Image: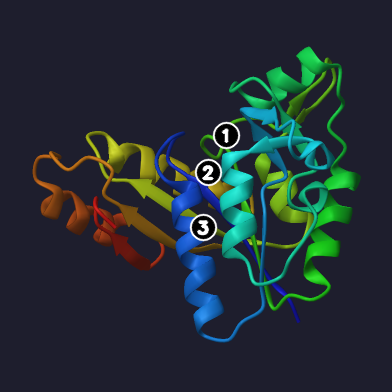
Amino acid sequence: MTEFYFITGTDTEIGKTWCTVKLARQWVAAGQRVACCKPLASGAAADPARPELGLINDDVEQLHAAASVTLPREIISPYRFAPAIAPHIAAKQAGVQIDLARIEQALQQAAKDADIVLIEGFGGWLAPVAMTADDVLWQSDIARLVDASVILVVGMRLGCINHSLLSARQILADGLRLHGWIANHIDPDMACHAENLRTLQALLPAEMMTEIGHSS
């Protein structure tokens, strides 16, 4: 049975893609068949030399390279947008309606030949997927499509305790399982990083899976 993990973070630009790649490589090295997906990706551009790939996003390319299950880009990332802005805003500007059924179909396709599917989110946990006058779609809605457990990437910098605990509390309030968390040292000059790490280990309601140094 395929296991699904949704990788979220305490903010944007805190290393979700890098941590997803590290997890993928770790499980591939352990003999697992791993697929990687990023259903929504902003900040993409066409490559005239490879027009068949459509809009190319660097995060998607990293995930494609790290996985052992090779997938078309439209399965890895059904929604890719040119501007590097929040996906729900990019979708509105492009006149695109985000369809959860399309995302679910892509995730199920990714799972066909995989033991593990890693799903990278965007921004922080409460960055919306889509907004209409009547409804809001959240990243929790994507995780629920495949009953994914959540892995929280903690960007180790000033403010990480508050951001981490709020994120974890909301993940659990949304009815999702918090599988574990990763300490990613994005700020090499962070004061009292050891003390902050011990605080997070004591207060977060899940085990720390790994700690990634700044130069890793």
Alpha-carbon distance for marks 2 and 1? 8 Å
Of helix, strand and loop, which one carries label 2? helix
Residue drawn 73% across the image and 63% down it:
147
Residue drawn 24% across the image and 56% down it:
213
- Above/below status of 93 relative to 213: above
Marks 1 and 3, the one that precedes in the sequence: 3
Asked if one can make out residue 113 in the rendered structure from this viewpoint, the answer is yes
How crowded pointer 3 is (Cα within 10 Å; few <14, some 14-19, many 20+) is rated as many
In this rendering, position of residue 181 left or right of residue 43: left
Q: Identify residue type, mark 2.
A: Gln
Q: Position of residue 85 (x, y in %)?
A: 60, 21
Depth check: give the residue in front, 75 or 107: 75
- Above/below status of 156 relative to 85: below
Report the residue marked by disc 3. Answer: 20
Report the residue marked by disc 2. Answer: 170
Asked if one can make out residue 204 in the rendered structure from this viewpoint, the answer is no
Q: Identify residue type, mark 1.
A: Leu
How crowded pointer 1 is (Cα within 10 Å; few <14, some 14-19, many 20+) is rated as some
Looking at the image, is mark 1 or mark 3 nearer the viewer?
3
Quadrant of the rendering where the C terminus is positioned: bottom left
Q: Which mark is residue 126?
A: 1
Dot 2 and dot 1 residues touching (CB under 8 Å)? yes
Alpha-carbon distance for marks 3 and 2? 21 Å
In the image as oriented, which residue stretches furthest toward the left? 192
Of helix, strand and loop, which one carries label 3? helix
Q: Position of residue 130 (x, y in %)?
A: 75, 27
